[in-house]
Amino acid sequence: MEEWRKYKLKDFIEFNPKEKVPQGELCRKISMDQITPFTRFVESNIYEVYKGGAKFRNYDTIMARITPCLENGKTAYISSLHPEEVAVGSTEYIVLRKRENISDSKFIFYLAISPIVRDIAIKSMVGSSGRQRVQQDVLENYEIPIPSLPTQKNIAHILSVLDDKIELNKRINDNLN
């Protein structure tokens, strides 16, 4: 059996990677209200003039950092952008990106929605009632065992296939109603 290596999350995941979007540029925006809780994908055809906020690309995971959005499951895997497109969103997102040859982007999504990461993020929240935010440094420095990259890909593939089946069943049920 493979041994899993312990990583601080910041050594496994790139948090809020730097992206350039010039002020005033028209770009795709994914706002918090467009994320359906506990649903993998989010799509947006809304374009706005960039004024600020989180920036992300395909294969990034965006996770709400503010209450109650994080507790409600507002985390999404970005996959509907054009190649090389940078989209923008709320300043209340934490953007999670894979580290080359270390982590798998889909595995990161499933890790982000797991109780392992969600519970640490929720417990780290500080601020006034109703406006609490994740302490990102607590999340970044949290240490967990992680499998090898091939095993991450296998785990993410199995979970993706199961999610695909769940989504298909939901669509079938919606058509029956």
Image (tube, rainbow, N blue to C red):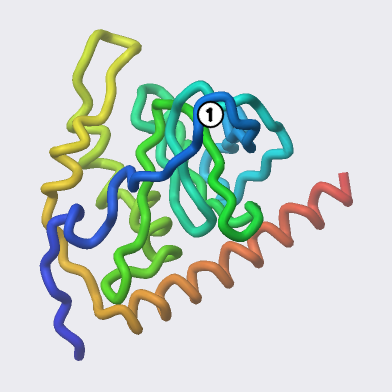
Q: Is residue 130 above or below residue 155?
A: above
166 left or right of 120 in image: right
Q: Is residue 41 above or below residue 137?
A: below
Residues 91 and 107: in front is 91
Q: Splitting the image into 4 quarters, where does residue 172 fall? A: bottom right
Q: Residue at x 41, y 26 (%)?
A: 91
**Label 1, on which residue?**
32
Q: Residue at x 14, y 39 (%)?
A: 138
6 left or right of 99 in image: left
Residues 140 and 28: in front is 28
Residues 87 and 111: in front is 87
Q: Splitting the image into 4 quarters, where does residue 29 fall? A: top right
* Badge 1 density bin: few <14, some 14–19, many ≥20, Cα 10 Å: some
Residue placed furthest toward the top:
128
Q: Is residue 128 above or below residue 133?
A: above
Residues 90 and 165: in front is 90
Q: Residue at x 43, y 34 (%)?
A: 54
Q: Say which element carries label 1.
A: helix
Residue placed furthest toward the bottom:
1
Amino acid on which the number 1 mark rests in the picture: Met
- Where's the C terminus, which quadrant? top right
84 left or right of 96 in image: right
Q: Position of residue 100 (x, y in %)?
A: 32, 70
Q: Residue at x 19, y 87 (%)?
A: 2
Q: Position of residue 115 (x, y in %)?
A: 30, 49
